[in-house]
Amino acid sequence: MKYKRILLKLSGEALAGTKGTGIDPEVLESLSDEVKALIDMGVEVGIVIGGGNIHRGVAGATKGMDRTTSDHMGMLATIINSIALQDSLERKDVYTRVLTAIEMKKIAEPYIRRRAVRHLEKKRVVIFAGGTGNPYFTTDTAAALRASEIDADVILKATKVDGIYDKDPMKHDDAVRFETLNYIDVLNKGIKVMDSTAITFCMDNKIDIIVFNVFEKGNIQKVVIGDKIGTTVTSDNN
């Protein structure tokens, strides 16, 4: 395997599937199968899930809601998604722990770095919920932070498309996919991979991001063993 310990970043919208909102049981089942396959390979898996299928903090703020209040609602939405994924994984006999940045002891464990690393070493899936625990930070930034804290080899950014393109491939047939991108190019060109805070954090800590299509079966395993899947964003200047 090329990567032994990964941080998988899932959007809340991905859990919604074609429904747009809520949680699609079929998507949850499919994602759980993919994660189980990684555990069977011996990969240590951390996951950060967004909450956009339930509530987006920024969207709420643009409609007049207090930004801090709206972000707190978004963080709670990530916990709902995390518990749903935990349930799906455990029904497949995959030991899973939800660690949340917002304490709620009767529902999930509080996030403690050493505890998270220990769970990973025991081959338990660790789902990091509640974002960073602070408003004004996205789950992209939470993914970059947790990946750094657990010393992950790479961040796998799961999307609906097979990488990063020079233009929207859904709208333009002549869109060209990048195999590799430099962090500086991503920031300078304003390419929407993750928010700029997350990108800068990954660049400073030399954590690569691989953007790939999570809905194509087997893609996560292919990335882990080193196949050229999707687009790699790296601090390497070569």
Image (tube, rainbow, N blue to C red):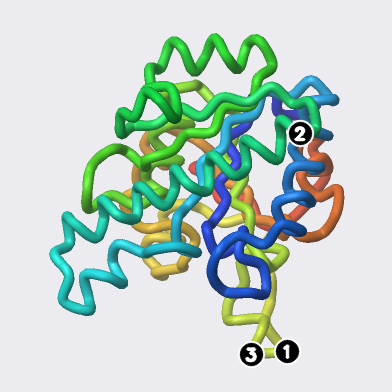
Q: Is residue 238 visible?
A: no
Q: Is residue 160 left or right of residue 227?
A: left
Q: Position of residue 86 (x, y in %)?
A: 62, 35
| CA distance separating discs 2 and 3 | 39 Å
Q: Residue at x 22, y 76 (%)?
A: 62
Q: Name the element at disc 2.
A: loop
Residue ID for mark 2:
91
Quadrant showing the N terminus: top right
Could you tell me which residue is drawn at 49 percent across and 42 percent down? 235
Q: Which amino acid lies under the numbered mark 1 shown in the image of this protein?
A: Asp
Give above or below for 156 relative to 108: below
Residue placed at 40% from the left, 31% from the top?
A: 100
Residue 201 lies in quadrant: top left
Q: CA distance from mark 3 to mark 1?
A: 7 Å
Residue highlighted by disc 1: 173
Identify the secondary structure beneath mark 3.
loop
Kind of residue at disc 3:
Lys
Closer to the observer: label 3 or label 1?
A: 3
Q: Amino acid at mark 2?
A: Arg
**Residue 98 seen in render:** yes
Write the residue at 70% across / 28% down. 3
The residue to which callout 3 is attached is 171
Quadrant position of residue 221: top right
